[in-house]
Amino acid sequence: MCLLFKWIIIGDFRKLQSRGLIPVDSWHSWRWILCNSLVHGTSELPLMLLNEFWLTATFWKLMGAKIGTNTLIDPNVLIFEADLLEIGDNCRIEEESTLLCHKFNDGGLKMDKIVIPSSC
């Protein structure tokens, strides 16, 4: 369901990133808000109920993140713009972590890549 929302509303966040500064009151900003709300609203409960590190990592890979081998991600980690996220091998992303590939700056929304190296 989440994957469907993402691909219908946004597609690939890298395309949205290539637009540079996105005005907060624009159609693209509205789509970004809608997509993130739907993805996180529909994925949180199933991931928490299943509570499996490998399943959480697989889910975020399907959402577009590049995740290395033996990387453990707690189910209640909040990730935005998974297409812009790279996590190396043998990493652990602890519970309640938030990985944001965006910021509001200069009067608009900017997206950028996050790279977490191996063995973190």
Image: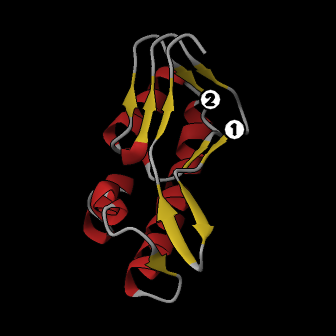
Residue 53 image point, x, y percent: 54, 22
In this image, 10 relative to 56: left or right? left
Residues packed near mark 1 inside 10 Å, few (<14), some (14 to 19) or many (20 plus): some
Q: Are marks 2 and 1 in contact (CB under 8 Å)?
A: yes
The N terminus sits in image quarter:
bottom left
Q: Secondary structure at mark 1?
A: loop
Please state which of residues 22 and 33 is positioned toward the viewer in this rendering.
22
Q: Nearer the viewer, mark 2 or mark 1?
A: 1
Q: Residue at x 60, y 35 (%)?
A: 75
Number of the label disc, if any, that sits on residue 20: none
Q: Is residue 5 above or below residue 120?
A: below
Q: Secondary structure at mark 2?
A: loop
Residue of label 2: 74
> Upstream in the sequence, badge 2 or badge 1?
2
Residues packed near mark 2 inside 10 Å, few (<14), some (14 to 19) or many (20 plus): many
Please state which of residues 93 and 45 is positioned toward the viewer in this rendering.
93
Residue 16 image point, x, y percent: 33, 65
Please state which of residues 12 and 42 is positioned toward the viewer in this rendering.
12
Number of the label disc, if any, that sits on residue 97: 1
In this image, 42 relative to 65: left or right? right
In this image, 85 relative to 107: left or right? left
* Kind of residue at disc 2: Asp
Residue 69 image point, x, y percent: 40, 13
Q: Quadrant of residue 77?
A: top right
Q: Quadrant of residue 103?
A: bottom right
Q: Is residue 67 above or below residue 12?
A: above
Q: Residue at x 45, y 19 (%)?
A: 88
Q: Residue at x 47, y 21 (%)?
A: 54
Residue 104 image point, x, y percent: 61, 68
Q: Is residue 118 above or below residue 29?
A: above
* Kind of residue at disc 1: Ser
